[in-house]
Image: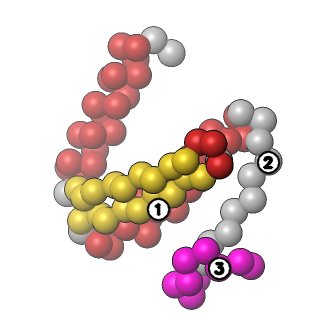
Amino acid sequence: MTSHSFDSQFELFKQMARRSGISGLAYIDFKPANGFLRIKLNVVPPEYQGMLISSLAQVLGQVSQMLGLEVKFHQDEDGQVGAKA
């Protein structure tokens, strides 16, 4: 994909989010040497937060698979951050 093509898709996604009224803040915490990555999203309006988190998790999973990594998902339903299944 060319840089122009990537830029066009990036702008398209930004426009779609703007039309949907989605905004907010993403906190990204990472430690490359330890293989640690954590993302916290605060999304407005709040009803979009779950959908965006799930979508982002799927995208990260797909990218990981493209890099040849096995992916195991854990979705925490009880609000305990870092809980194990």
Q: Please identify the quadrant where the C terminus is shown.
A: bottom right
Which quadrant of the view contains residue 67?
Answer: top right
Seen at 34% across and 31% down, the residue is 10
Q: Secondary structure at mark 3?
A: loop
The magenta segment is: 77-85
**Which kind of residue does numbered mark 3 sit on?**
Ala
Callout 1 secondary element: helix
| Mark 3 surroundings within 10 Å by alpha-carbon count, few (fewer than 14), some (14 through 19), many (20 or more) | few
Residue 77 point in image, percent of width and height: 58, 83
Q: Amino acid at mark 1?
A: Ile
Task: Give the number of marks.
Answer: 3
User: Quarter of the image holding residue 68?
Assistant: top right
Give above or below for 26 relative to 32: below
Q: What residue is shown at x 65% (from left), y 79% (from top)?
A: 83
User: Quick check: is 3 in the magenta stretch?
Assistant: no
Q: Position of residue 31 (x, y in %)?
A: 55, 48
**Residue beneath the point at 79% across and 48% down:** 70
Tell me the distance, in whole angstroms, between the alpha carbons under discs 1 and 2. Answer: 20 Å
Mark 3 or 1, which is nearer the eye?
Answer: 3
In this picture, residue 77 sits left or right of residue 4: right
Q: Main secondary structure of the magenta part?
A: loop
Looking at marks 3 and 1 on the same chain, the residue that comes earlier in the sequence is marked by 1
Q: Amino acid at mark 2?
A: Glu
Q: Secondary structure at mark 2?
A: loop
Task: Work out which residue is located at the far front of the displayed protein and give it.
Answer: 33
* Mark 1 surroundings: few (<14), some (14-19) or many (≥20) residues within 10 A: some
Foreground tag (2 vs 3):
3
Q: Residues within 10 Å of mark 2 (few under 14, many from 20)?
A: few
Residue that label 2 marks: 70
Q: Which mark is residue 83?
A: 3
61 left or right of 51 in image: right
Q: Earlier in the sequence, mark 1 or mark 2?
A: 1
